[in-house]
Image (cartoon, rainbow, N blue to C red):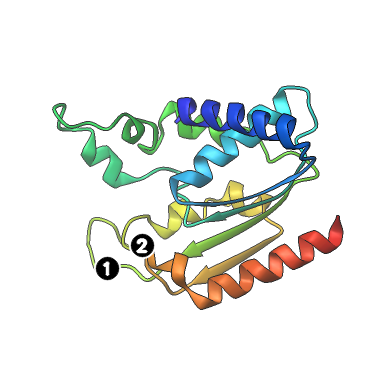
Amino acid sequence: MDQVSEWLYSQIKILRARYDIDKFYIIAHSMGGLISLKYIQKQSQSGHSPNIDLFVSISTPWTGSKAAKLGTINPLAVVPSWKDIVPGSQFIEGLLLNPIPKGTQYFLLFSYHGIPNPMFIGNDGRVSISSQLDLRMQKEAVKIYGFNEKHSGILSSKDLIRILCEILDHSVGRS
């Protein structure tokens, strides 16, 4: 996950230089929210103004995923990013230590139409609601929206699209 956020950092740096872009809005789903927050923190720590006016996370596993822990048990098929999203991992804990920089509006969107599974009570089919609604991230949010959708289904939700348009309209009007 650190490598992917490093790649994102380098690509956005190129975009800024090539096209003289002075601000960004980031909308990220699932693990993309973790990678994006790491990028935002890295940009802020670099001493440059982050110029990220808006960050929206959708169904992000802020405290990790118990399913990822199960995925790390079989050493023949472990996906490296799974190690990073195991609850309590160094990546997850380090990520949540640093707040979102001032000047970046953050909206937390979560999904909760899960499947009955005694191992993962309260979920959207992939990520637990408690992970999506980590209190540290709730405190950072300007507003929180919940959607009765499954983890990937949220991306085609008309309600989600409407809320995203409202958030973007408000953010553009702020600039």
> In the visual, does 125 lie left or right of 14?
left
Mark 1: amino acid: Ile
Is 87 drawn above or below residue 89 in the view shown? below
Q: Quadrant of residue 96?
A: top right
Q: Nearer the viewer, residue 27 or 145?
A: 27
> In the visual, does 8 lie left or right of 4?
right
> Looking at the image, do the residues carrying marks 2 and 1 touch, with CB atoms under 8 Å apart?
yes
In this figure, which residue is indicated by the disc labeled 1?
115
Q: Residues within 10 Å of mark 2 (few under 14, many from 20)?
A: many
In the rendered image, the residue lying farthest to the top is: 46
Quadrant showing the N terminus: top left
Q: Nearer the viewer, residue 21 or 83?
A: 21
Quadrant showing the C terminus: bottom right
Q: Quadrant of residue 117?
A: bottom left
In this figure, which residue is indicated by the disc labeled 2?
123
Is 90 drawn above or below residue 113 in the view shown? above
Q: Which mark is residue 55?
A: none
Give the percent coordinates (x, y) of residue 81: 36, 33
Is 98 drawn above or below residue 151 in the view shown? above
How far apart are the two marked residues, 2 and 1, measured between alpha carbons? 7 Å
Mark 2: amino acid: Asn
